[in-house]
């Protein structure tokens, strides 16, 4: 194969030029950190417009626009339990202009489930801040004999696999919660998966189709208020401010802590200055009492963590879910 | 305070100039959002909610609710005029609606759809006023096993849709079911037929499929000799006496179907319109004309989907359960204004609740008053030379497919199914069975597998539950009647159900 001298020269210039160009780019990025953000930020949400994740993200986006003096565009890329949005975000340039709303268990489950072939893993995310932690809770019909977490565990143990509970799908937080409860107490409860989500699960429960309703505390609160359900226990370390009278599983001596949570992340490799700047800004926004009131009205339990704490929480939750994952698969 | 005094006071508030104005804005916005395929009223409402925070809560909710049912009507316009289903719920309207347009009867189709929507919406809202609580209980009694058996009735009605050739009908129906099987298995959690693309994990969204099969498929099939739909004259806009006589029973039946199906949380209004259409195909006096531009084919699905949209408020007000994604967004608006939807709302905020219910009546009327005069304007679209219109339609369906989930893959899906639609037309395969199974498929699978998890694997659950047993028996009867009936017809040398 012969090469013309001209092509060779071009190739050499190219080879020399590449690192130079890269340097130039690097310089410009670090120079830009000071006046970040200088162009619109894209916030990718992996669910449809109007859902709770979207509502929370839009609330933060609006407040953050003012705080950072920037334009933030919320882009919905719904589907595949956010895997599409995470794939998109983790492949984006780590320049601080593409951010995603990250939720648990989706950000962890899509990685754990090998059949999903996720192109990202834990290390592809640079966590920014945690916004919402919504613990999982168990409810029964108001006339049920089950009144406390202990009675629930005893009832399930008396007839293993006979009590049925709703979940919002395979490997959802409710499904992990059942696995954790079984691991911790030996109580075996049969899951009924409602892949269409919480409202289909609630309807089926209210119609008497399942024994237990499992859902996030925020979803259960209005139903408890109207007397249609009785919440037996909350799977958290402390009682929920939404349901202060309901005991936790911890109080009964069962170490079961499962929640769905929502936060924000940049692609890995985003400069620390940018992550800190946005993380701090979200923290300041969330301290505003008006903002907190808006979140509470939407049923979002505000729970801020900065970038460092959110990273640690992410690692911890990933460990918990990957330990439970074999049980979740076995449950099917 | 009794219901009717409360409602009368509600009307007083809903008819205030400010609330009327917001209802009008909402209807207009909803219609426009409904026209664009892919951009539904749900997304429109979600994006507008922050703007409504500055408004009076009653007006805000009235406007958002008006967007919601305005969207149901907007989808009709493109289905009828351009053969593009703006939303899944208008897909089946394309079949007869577009045939009417080709015959210069676009105006009649749109006017009938408008009137049908108004009647369906009003009947469903009346049901909300008169019997919200018992109806909500009825909705709750339809659990997964009952719903499965109910959908079996829908599948049995399919026999009426397969057309002259049972084989061709079944090919179309099976293809629809196959497309519906794409996605993550709801119980095992494993991806099926996804080509490893996360985009297909939730299944293939049906809007690009339908837009391709109807819109692009039709364009390709007629590329040799373009159809010349003629814009109707002013006199041709209004239905004549025969039209009224024929659509009245269809509208009546469809109002009932839409109201009942709308009570079941989580069921899409596309199912109501499909069941209403299939019912007409079975019971209408002119069932042989369905598929060739019969007025019943427009009146029934359009009435049913609007009745469904309005009936979906019943579970929201009585149980606090959002019955559809659009209602869930509306519930978000309630919450953001500090109101928790549910039965306690009637005692804590009676004025607000009754004003909103009254505004549903007012909004439905506004939608009628707004859209019937505009029918003349919409049909002017047909006066655009088809060579120009074709390019516009193509751009329109590409953008619409992209907008479903901001993804280019949906454009490829649309183009692929455009080719499928072209082949269907070339070999004479009917489209209706595919639409039916494509939309019902995921619901059948979900309900079947949820039921089996509830019964711990026993199929007896479908006959142990009385309501489920009744539905199953009805399905068997329909099936038996169709098979027996068509056998008799064939013996007598008469044509069986006409091709769709």
Image (cartoon, helix red, strand yellow):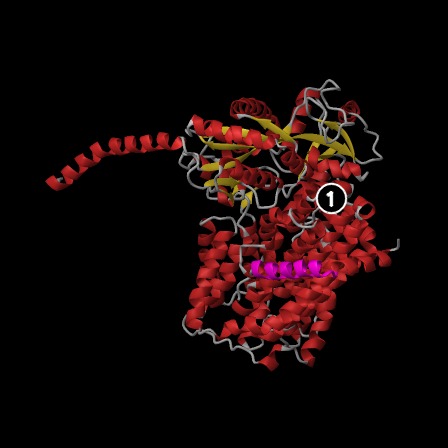
Question: Looking at the rendering, in which quadrant would you find the C terminus of chain B?
Answer: bottom right
Chain for mark 1?
B
Report the magenta residues as a range: B15-33
Residue B306, quarter of the rendered image: bottom right
The residue that mark 1 highlights is B339
Residue B353 position, x and y percent, is: 77, 51
Residue A214 position, x and y percent, is: 70, 34
* Up/down of B460 relative to B34, above or below: above
B339 with respect to B423 (left or right): right
Residue A201 position, x and y percent, is: 70, 41
Residue B232, quarter of the rendered image: bottom right
Residue B80 position, x and y percent, is: 57, 68
Residue in the picture at 53% in, 40% down: A45
Towards the viewer: A272 or B57: B57
Q: Residues within 10 Å of mark 1 (few under 14, many from 20)?
A: some
B79 with respect to A220 (left or right): left
The question of residue B148 being in magenta is answered with no
Say if residue A103 shows up in the picture. yes
Towards the viewer: B14 or A86: B14
Residue in the picture at 48% in, 62% down: B421
């Amino acid at each position: 194969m012969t090469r013309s001298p001209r092509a060779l020269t071009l190739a050499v210039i190219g080879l020399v030029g590449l690192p130079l160009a890269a340097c130039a780019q690097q310089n410009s990025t670090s120079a830009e950190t000071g006046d970040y953000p200088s162009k619109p930020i894209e916030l990718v949400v992996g669910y449809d417009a109007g859902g709770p994740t979207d509502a929370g993200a839009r609330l933060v986006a609006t407040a953050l626009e003012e705080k950072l003096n920037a334009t933030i565009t919320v882009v919905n890329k719904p589907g595949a339990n956010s895997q599409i949005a995470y794939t998109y975000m983790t492949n984006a340039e780590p320049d601080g202009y593409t951010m995603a709303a990250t939720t648990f268990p989706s950000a962890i489950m899509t990685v754990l489930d090998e059949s999903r072939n996720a192109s990202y893993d834990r290390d592809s995310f640079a966590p920014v801040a945690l916004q919402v932690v919504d613990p999982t809770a168990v409810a029964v019909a108001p006339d049920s004999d089950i009144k406390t977490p202990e009675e629930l565990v005893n009832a399930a143990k008396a007839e293993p696999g006979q009590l049925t509970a709703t979940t919002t799908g395979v490997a959802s937080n409710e499904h992990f919660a059942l696995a954790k409860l079984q691991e911790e107490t030996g109580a075996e409860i049969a899951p009924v998966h409602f892949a269409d989500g919480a409202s289909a699960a609630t309807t089926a429960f209210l119609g008497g189709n399942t024994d237990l309703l499992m859902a996030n505390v925020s979803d259960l609160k209005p139903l408890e208020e109207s007397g249609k359900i009785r919440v037996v226990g909350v799977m958290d370390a402390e009682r929920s401010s939404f349901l202060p009278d309901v005991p936790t599983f911890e109080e009964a001596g069962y170490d079961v802590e499962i929640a769905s949570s929502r936060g924000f992340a940049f692609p890995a490799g985003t400069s620390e200055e940018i992550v800190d700047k946005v993380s701090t800004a979200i923290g300041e926004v969330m301290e505003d009492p008006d903002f907190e009131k808006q979140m509470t009205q939407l049923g979002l339990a505000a729970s801020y963590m900065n970038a460092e704490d959110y990273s640690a929480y992410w690692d911890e939750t990933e460990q918990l879910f990957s330990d439970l994952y074999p049980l979740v698969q076995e449950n099917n | 305070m009794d219901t009717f005094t409360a409602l009368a006071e509600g009307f007083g508030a809903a008819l205030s100039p400010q609330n009327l104005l917001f209802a009008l804005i909402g209807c207009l916005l909803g219609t426009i959002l409904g026209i664009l395929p892919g951009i539904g009223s749900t997304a429109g409402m979600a994006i507008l909610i922050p703007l409504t925070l500055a408004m009076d809560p009653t007006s805000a909710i009235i406007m958002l609710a008006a967007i919601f049912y305005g969207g149901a009507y907007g989808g009709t316009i493109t289905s009828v005029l351009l053969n593009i289903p703006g939303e899944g719920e208008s897909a089946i309207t394309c079949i007869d609606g577009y045939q009417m347009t080709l015959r210069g009867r676009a105006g009649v189709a749109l006017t009938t759809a408008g009137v049908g929507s108004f009647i369906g919406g009003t009947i469903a809202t009346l049901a909300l006023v008169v019997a919200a609580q018992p109806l909500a209980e009825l909705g709750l009694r339809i659990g997964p096993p009952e719903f499965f058996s109910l959908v079996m009735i829908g599948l049995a009605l399919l026999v009426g849709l397969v057309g002259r050739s049972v084989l061709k009908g079944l090919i179309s129906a099976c293809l629809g079911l196959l497309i519906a099987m794409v996605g993550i298995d709801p119980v095992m959690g494993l991806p099926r037929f996804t080509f490893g693309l996360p985009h297909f994990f939730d299944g293939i969204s049906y809007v690009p499929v339908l837009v391709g099969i109807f819109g692009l498929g039709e364009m390709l099939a007629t590329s040799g000799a373009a159809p010349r739909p003629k814009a109707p004259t002013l006199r041709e806009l209004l239905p004549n006496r025969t039209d009224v006589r024929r659509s009245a029973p269809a509208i009546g039946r469809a109002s009932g179907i839409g109201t009942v199906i709308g009570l079941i949380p989580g069921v899409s209004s596309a199912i109501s319109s499909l069941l209403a259409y299939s019912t007409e195909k079975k019971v209408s006096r002119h069932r042989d004309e369905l598929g060739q531009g019969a007025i019943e084919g427009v009146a029934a699905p359009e009435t049913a989907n609007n009745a469904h949209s309005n009936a979906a408020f019943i579970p929201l007000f009585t149980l606090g359960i959002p019955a559809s994604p659009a209602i869930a967004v509306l519930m978000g608006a309630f919450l953001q204004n500090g109101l928790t939807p549910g039965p306690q709302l009637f005692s804590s905020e009676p004025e607000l609740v009754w004003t909103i219910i009254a505004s549903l009546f007012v909004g439905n009327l506004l939608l009628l008053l707004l859209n019937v005069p505009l029918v003349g304007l919409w049909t002017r679209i047909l006066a655009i030379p088809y060579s120009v219109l074709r390019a516009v339609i193509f751009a329109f369906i590409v953008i619409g497919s992209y907008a479903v989930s901001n993804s280019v893959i949906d454009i490829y899906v649309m183009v692929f199914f455009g080719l499928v639609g072209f082949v269907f037309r070339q070999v004479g395969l009917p489209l209706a069975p595919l639409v039916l199974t494509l939309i019902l498929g995921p619901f059948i699978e979900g309900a079947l597998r949820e039921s089996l998890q509830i019964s711990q694997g026993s199929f007896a659950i479908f006959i142990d539950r009385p309501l489920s047993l009744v539905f199953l028996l009805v399905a068997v009867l329909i099936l038996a009647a169709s098979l027996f009936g068509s056998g008799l017809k064939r013996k007598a040398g008469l044509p069986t159900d006409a091709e769709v």
